[in-house]
């Protein structure tokens, strides 16, 4: 299956608790970190929830 790279581009400071937990679930703990996940609908849903804090790296 294909993979997707996600990079945290904005700070989690001031974000609601559920969005912080979503970033933790994606494995993003610090700014400018890049993580790689399988491209599944559940991962896409997590990315969509915090789309204003992350970018998808090609």
Image: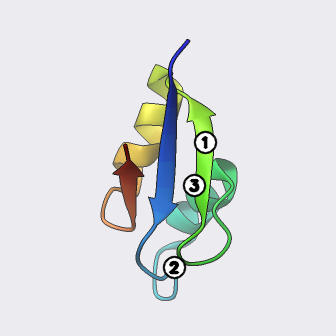
Quarter of the picture holding the C terminus:
top left
- Mark 1, mark 2: which one is toward the viewer? 1
Quarter of the picture holding the N terminus:
top right
Sequence-wise first label, 3 or 1: 3
Q: Say left or right for 32 vs 58.
A: right
Disc 2, SS: loop
Report the residue marked by disc 3.
Answer: 22
Q: Which mark is residue 49?
A: none
For the residues labelled 1 and 2, the Cα–Cα distance comes to 19 Å
Disc 3, SS: helix
For the residues labelled 3 and 2, the Cα–Cα distance comes to 10 Å
As displayed, is residue 54 above or below residue 25?
below
Q: Say left or right for 3 vs 41.
A: right
For the point 48% across and 74% down, the residue is: 16
* Farthest-out residue, left: 52
Tags 3 and 2 in contact by the CB under 8 Å rule?
no
Sequence-wise first label, 1 or 2: 2
Tags 1 and 2 in contact by the CB under 8 Å rule?
no
As displayed, is residue 52 above or below residue 27?
below
- Mark 3, mark 1: which one is toward the viewer? 1
State the residue in front, 37 or 23. Answer: 37
As displayed, is residue 29 above or below residue 13?
above
Q: Position of residue 29 (x, y in %)?
A: 68, 70
Sequence-wise first label, 3 or 2: 2
Report the residue marked by disc 2.
Answer: 12
* Farthest-out residue, top: 1
For the point 43% across and 46% down, the residue is: 47
For the residues labelled 3 and 1, the Cα–Cα distance comes to 15 Å
Q: In which quarter of the view is residue 52 placed? A: bottom left
Report the residue marked by disc 1.
Answer: 36
* Farthest-out residue, bottom: 13
Q: In which quarter of the view is residue 21 placed? A: bottom right
């Amino acid at each position: 299956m294909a993979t997707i790279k996600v990079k945290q581009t904005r700070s989690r400071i001031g974000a609601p608790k559920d969005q912080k937990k979503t970033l933790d679930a994606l494995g993003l703990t610090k700014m400018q970190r890049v993580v790689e996940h399988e491209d599944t609908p559940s991962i896409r849903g997590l990315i969509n929830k915090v789309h204003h804090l992350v970018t998808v790296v090609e």
